Image (cartoon, helix red, strand yellow):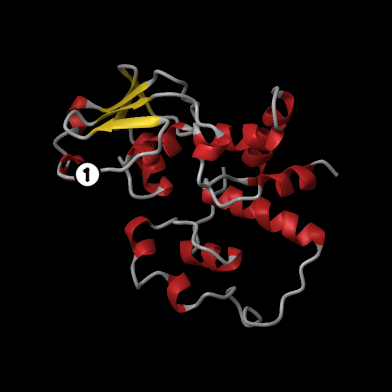
Amino acid sequence: MARYTGPSCKLCRREGQKLFLKGERCYGGKCAMERRAYAPGQHGQGRKKSSTYGLQLREKQKAKRFYGLQETQFRNYFDKAERKQGITGDNLLIMLETRLDNTVFRMGFASSRKEARQLVTHGHFTLNGKKVDIPSLQVKAGDVIAVKAKSTDSPKFKEIKEMTISTPEWVSMDTEKLEGKVLSMPTRSQIDTPVAENLIVELYSK
């Protein structure tokens, strides 16, 4: 499957806000949004006129890039969210938030979702004691995610043991054991993704 391989910072500049795609770099002065907070390209600093469709499209693109998904993947999530009971927009964000790679990121095992996806793909984690390497796998309440025994000596994970990690309310993290647990399914109020999901629903409902 094709995946975007260009500069991550261009995606943030295009959406007009930080998407935190490069981990620690996004929090420092080297962040492109700190130096060039306008869209890339020769017309990036020109006046912008956004239609209703344009606003809806930007929210969809923002959410898609935030979670590192391709168009078809994102649309499939929306279709599943629409079929579930409840509010479609809330369902969509909860499904995206409970992907394995995002959960690994939320627990503090990785500094970005991109890094989390790579760590999962390389087989560094177990889910309820079984090795997993599928980033899109959906986690559920009670699931335990841990660093695989053979990977605990990696400098990456040794560093985590010395860190104090702040996690969302719906997950917990034991840095000493290199183990995290999904305490509950997240609610919309516990998801800090800066996306107006109602605009995405409007876009796909046309």
| Residue 25 x, y percent position in the rendering | 34, 63
Name the residue located 27 percent from the left edge and 43 percent from the top edge: 165
Split into 4 quadrants, where in the image is the N terminus?
A: top right
Residue 90 drawn at (x, y percent) = 63, 35
Q: Residue at x 52, y 75 (%)?
A: 37
For the point 44% across and 39% down, the residue is 102
Going by the image, does 45 lie left or right of 154? Answer: right
Where is residue 54, by image quadrant?
bottom right
Up the image or down, 136 lies above or below 192; here it is above
Q: SS at mark 1?
A: loop
Q: Is residue 64 left or right of residue 169?
A: right
Where does residue 87 sit, x and y in percent of width and height? 70, 31
**Residue 158: percent from left, percent from top:** 15, 41
Question: Residue farthest to the front?
Answer: 189
Q: Amino acid at mark 1?
A: Thr
Quarter that holds the C terminus? top right
User: Between residues 97 and 86, which one lies in front from this camera angle?
Assistant: 86
Circle count? 1
Is residue 114 positioned above or below 75 on the image? Answer: below
| Mark 1 nearby-residue class (10 Å; few <14, some 14–19, many ≥20) | few
Residue at which label 1 appears: 164
Q: Which residue lies most toward the right here? A: 206
Residue at x 72%, y 55% (from the top left corner): 57
Q: Quadrant of residue 128?
A: top left
Position of 23 relative to 184 (above/below): below
Position of 59 with respect to 192 (left or right) is: right
